[in-house]
Structure formats: structure tokens, C-alpha cells
Amino acid sequence: MKKLLLLSVLLSVAYLGNAQFTPCLYDFGLEQLEQQFTGYQERSQQAIKKAVQQYRQRRGPNDEVFLIPVVVHVVWKEEAENISDERIAAQVRVLNESFRRQNADTVNTRPEFLAVAGDARVEFELVDVIRVPTDTTFKPEVSLFGGSTLPDHVKQSALGGSDAADPVNHLNIWVCALQPISILGTESPILGYAYPPAGLDNWPAETPIPELALEGVVVDYRTVGDNETYEVPQVGELPMLGRTMVHEVGHYLGLRHTSGDGALAALGVPDCEADDGVADTPNQGTQSQFNCDFMQNTCTDESDDLPDMVENYMDYSREDCQNSFTQGQIEIMRAVLTGPRAELPVLNISSSEEAFASRAIQIYPNPSSGRFRIQPSEPGRSVHYQYTVCDFLGRTVVPLSEGGQPLQLDLSAQPNGVYYLRFKEKESEQWLSQQLLKQ
């Protein structure tokens, strides 16, 4: 909405002199890359716009479900920073629920935004966890006047971090203790940062480009999981429900903050001329400062005035408020996955396969507390199935089995979440998949 401003220094903090909290360093990342590679911001945004145009031209009636392989690097100094496999698994589940709009709190999306909230049809599969002990401190240095540097040494083994694992074909996520930044003498905790797509095919051959090994997402270890808290000085105890990583992956896939990061917003003054480049997010002058104020309306439009969309993952609202991406944001992310990051998804599950699977069988109840009944959709048909069930991380929870209809699946012993039933008729060569939701 309105014009897209590409600025060298972008901040989303409260008025200088008040309590400052800059949880996401995306904007400083843009500044740093612009300093190193003149024209980075413009080329990156142009690459995303071009990808969106191409995506609109070639999109058919059935969009694929993109599956992104994920490598998590746990770079730790203190034992508390060496987070458990269970917290990582919970975080991947949150990513999947959030990008598929399957999180339980979608019921909290306000009526005025229901029409634009959507399923991004993007899923994540954890393929490796790399743990690296370190003596290194990861502290960003930022300045209101330029010269910012981010702790990208967490991505380099030689500097006390962990080298990226095949960043072309994997989303690398680094988890570490991010030290707070100091702005005008006030410390501000950092939750994470990520770089947008570089749009490498748009760069002239003679132009230096950002280092591919630095692509990915960095988050503070206290944000990982689905039931953590973070005590922030002058702000209080914040719930951490795994949505910091959802926010940062949004940046990695081309999204900006909902406020558009206007220059005046850095001073706590709503900048209603700035924009995030997404038509269906309301005009928003400043980022929410970790509140859940559903009456917040930082910009008043002459027509179709809407409050700020504090339930959007790309705001700075509290994580227990956030529950949605808009269709416009989804279009950008999916365009990036068929454009600048086209080599990232390794498996596309066509929606036509899902539709065929849903016609082939009936599953009820679904959602369920754990017990599912599965039978052919065609009345009176006798079918013998081969089937298996895995969780969102690809781990098998029901080994390859055979059974006639109706099948009785009991997942009562499994934690709540989304599971995949893979099945085929015994004599068939075609495996199909259907989701099961245990809650």
C-alpha cells in the first residue's frame, strides 16, 4: 500500500529515551548488505517483484505444497543454550502449523481479516541438527547512522560458529545466545534476523554478490520451542511460542515488516507513507511494541480504514497474538520459492494428489483425540491397504502395515500435532497422502 521505501537505516523501536526493544535485525541486515554490495536492497526487491509477476503468469489452479529441508545449528557456550531435541521438534511443528494455517489460534483472527488470511502451503522437514560448542560471543553492533555489523560469524566454523550445510538446497537455522545491542546507551535484546533473497540471477556478472554461505536465519535460543518465556528488561516476561522463527523465515522468503519500516518510525512517529509492498496488509505506521492491542490503528486511511493487523506474523506484536499471513504475503513467499529460492524445495506435493486422496478415502473424526477410522469413499467397496504414518519431522510413528477396510488408527500415545498417512491399495503403485490432526 502506498510507496515502498528502501532506506539505508531502518529501525522499529519506541521513541528514543523510552524503553527500546528491537527484536528483529532484518533492517540492519539490509543496511549491512547495502554497505557491502551497493544496490543490494533495490536488486533484492526487484528480484522479488519479478518473481511475483512470473508466478502470477504461470500459476495454475492447483498450487504445490512446498517442502523445505531444514538444518538447525545449535552453537552454544552455556548449557542452557544447548537446547533439547524436543524443543527443536516443537519449533518445527510450529513452523508447519503456522505456514499451513493449522495452528489452533487461527480462531482469533478478527473477522475483518478472515478473507485475506491464508494457508501458505509451505512445509518444513528437519533433516539434521548440528551442535557446536563455542567460546565465541555473538553480539551485533548497530548504529543509527550506518556502519552496522551483524554476528554472521555464527555461520562460520573458523570464527567459532558452524558452517552452513548446502544453503542452496537447505534452510539453515542458527540458534545461539544473541547479545543485546546498545542504542544511545539503552540495551535492546535481540530475538533474531534473516536476509531476504539476493536475487542472484539479477546481478551483473561483474558485480560482487553476498556470500551464499551466510544465507539463512539466526535466532536467540530463548525463542525456540512452543512454550518458552523471555524476561526483557523494562518490557516484562514475554511468551515465546516459536513465532520468532516464523517471523524470520518470513523475511528469508521475501517479506518485510508490516509497518514498512519507515524512517520516522525509528523515532516513534507513525510513518504512514512507508509500506511493506503487500496490498492486503493494512497501512501501519509503526511496529507494535509487543502488545496485543486490537484497537491499535497507527494510520487512518480515507476509505476502508482498518486497524493494524497485530495478528500478523510480520508485526512486533506479542507471540500469543500472532496467527496469520495474508494472501498477499503468501503470494510473495511462494513466488520466491519458484524464483530466487527455486532450488530450496526438494519435494512438491501437488494439490491434485491431495484432492485425489481425499476422494479415495474418508477419515473420521479428523481432527481427533487420537483414534481415526479410515474407509473407502466409495460405498460398499472392499479395499486392502498398505499404509504408514509419520509425523511432521518425517519420523515414522506407524510402521509399514497392511489392513483391510475400515482401518483403525490409534495415535493416542503420540503428542498432539499434524501427521501424514501414506497409503495405497495393495496392488497399486500409487502412494497417496492425507493429513491427520490429533488435538
Image (cartoon, grey):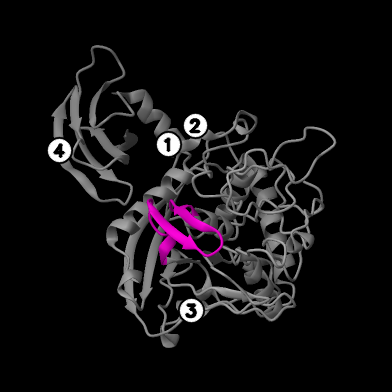
Label 2 environment density (alpha carbons within 10 Å; few <14, some 14–19, many ≥20): few
What whole-number distance in Å separates the C-alpha atoms at marks 1 and 4?
31 Å
Q: Is residue 271 above or below residue 199?
A: above
The question of residue 205 being in magenta is answered with no
Q: Which residue is mark 1?
A: 104
Residue type, numbered disc 4: Ser
Q: Earlier in the sequence, mark 2 or mark 3?
A: 2
Vertical comparison of 403 with 123: above or below: above
The location of residue 153, given as percent across then percent down, is 49, 81
Q: Which residue is mark 2?
A: 107
> Where does residue 297 sit, x and y in percent of width and height?
72, 42
Give the residue number, with chain letter if any, for mark 3. 138
Distance of mark 2 from mark 1, alpha carbons?
Answer: 7 Å
Q: CA distance from mark 2 to mark 3?
A: 38 Å
Q: For mark 3, give the secondary structure.
A: loop
Say whether disc 4 or disc 2 marks the residue closer to the N-terminus.
2
